[in-house]
Image (cartoon, helix red, strand yellow):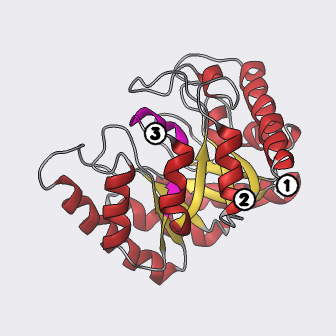
């Protein structure tokens, strides 16, 4: 497994700072945030300007470009995201499911949307991943399985995020076995409680919450998963977190992730 961090953790800072701090924390790679409002790292409206810097920083800090997070399923936005992915060498684009939980017709609509986007992903040779998300049409294991059964494109995969499965009142460790063969990316973070949001940024650091992340990583290892495991912590920009606070979250989580991999013989 490749350990990375989503640059959104450093959303209040420039991309060079994100790369530098992720490298100092000891990660293997980085996931580039293309999330409007939470960062100005990969700004898709001017991606041609951002792409050379991303490639330069990746080489300078020896951080593999593991993925991009671009939440929208808007076809025009996703088309640009895929072009940016090809130019920079980013292999995976992670998006949100969209829609609304348990609303009639919502999951069918999202499946149709994702299916069309997968055709474009096949064209570009990138992988499109979606994750179960609190409040979305795909929000738990049953709805995830519905989407996975309907979308058979080789360019489609599951982005498995234990914090959302936990907040769907499921056990993420038990849920893994049902979807392991379709996982192509992992967004990882901890969570205290089962409220709608993931909680304060520091409580999203692995080991701070209620999720059995050691058990989670052990199952990933048992199922043969070798892809990216990227820390995704949100809220630091809106809450005015300092660079020191963001670095602490990154480093603390990297230590926990490494210990989990060593404990289950994966590293």
Spot occupied by residue 5 in the image (x, y as percentages of width and height): 70, 44
**What is the C-alpha distance between the residues marked 1 and 3?**
26 Å
The C terminus sits in image quarter: bottom right
> Which residue bears the numbered disc 2?
221
> Which residue bears the numbered disc 1?
265
Instruction: Tell me if 98 is positioned left or right of 61 in this view.
Output: left
Task: Answer whether residue 164 is magenta in the image.
Answer: yes
Q: Do the numbered discs 2 and 1 sit on residues whose CB atoms are within 8 Å?
A: yes
**What is the C-alpha distance between the residues marked 2 and 1?**
8 Å
Instruction: Tell me if 6 is positioned left or right of 144 in this view.
Output: right
Task: Give the magenta-colored segment's residue range.
Answer: 158-169
Q: In this rendering, is residue 77 above or below 213?
A: below
- Residue at image position (73%, 39%) is 18
**What is the C-alpha distance between the residues marked 2 and 3?**
21 Å
User: Dot 1 surroundings within 10 Å: few (below 14), some, or many (20 or more)?
Assistant: few
Lower position in the chain sequence, tag 1 or tag 3: 3
- Residue at image position (84%, 37%) is 25
């Amino acid at each position: 497994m490749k350990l990375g961090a989503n640059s959104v953790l450093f959303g209040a800072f420039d991309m060079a700072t994100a790369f530098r701090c992720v490298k100092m924390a000891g990660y293997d790679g980085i996931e580039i945030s293309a999330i409007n409002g939470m960062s100005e790292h990969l700004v898709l409206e001017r991606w041609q300007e951002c792409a050379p810097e991303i490639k330069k920083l990746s080489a300078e800090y020896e951080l593999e470009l593991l993925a991009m997070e671009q939440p929208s399923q808007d076809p025009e936005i996703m088309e640009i995201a895929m072009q940016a992915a090809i130019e920079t060498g980013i292999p995976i684009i992670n998006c949100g499911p969209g829609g609304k939980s348990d609303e009639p017709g919502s999951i069918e609509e999202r499946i149709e949307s994702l299916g069309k986007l997968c055709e474009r992903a096949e064209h570009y040779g990138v992988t499109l991943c979606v994750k179960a998300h609190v409040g979305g049409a795909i929000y738990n294991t049953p709805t995830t399985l519905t989407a996975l059964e309907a979308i058979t494109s080789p360019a489609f995969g599951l982005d498995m995020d234990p914090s959302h499965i936990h907040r769907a009142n499921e056990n993420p460790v038990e849920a893994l076995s049902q979807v392991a063969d379709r996982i192509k990316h992992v967004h990882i973070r901890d969570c205290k409680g089962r409220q709608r949001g993931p909680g304060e940024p520091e409580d999203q650091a692995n080991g701070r919450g209620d999720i059995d992340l050691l058990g989670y990583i052990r199952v990933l290892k048992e199922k043969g998963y070798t892809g990216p495991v990227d820390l995704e912590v949100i809220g630091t920009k809106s809450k005015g977190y300092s660079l020191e606070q963001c670095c602490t979250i990154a480093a603390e989580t990297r230590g926990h992730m490494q210990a989990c991999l060593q404990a289950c013989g994966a590293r």
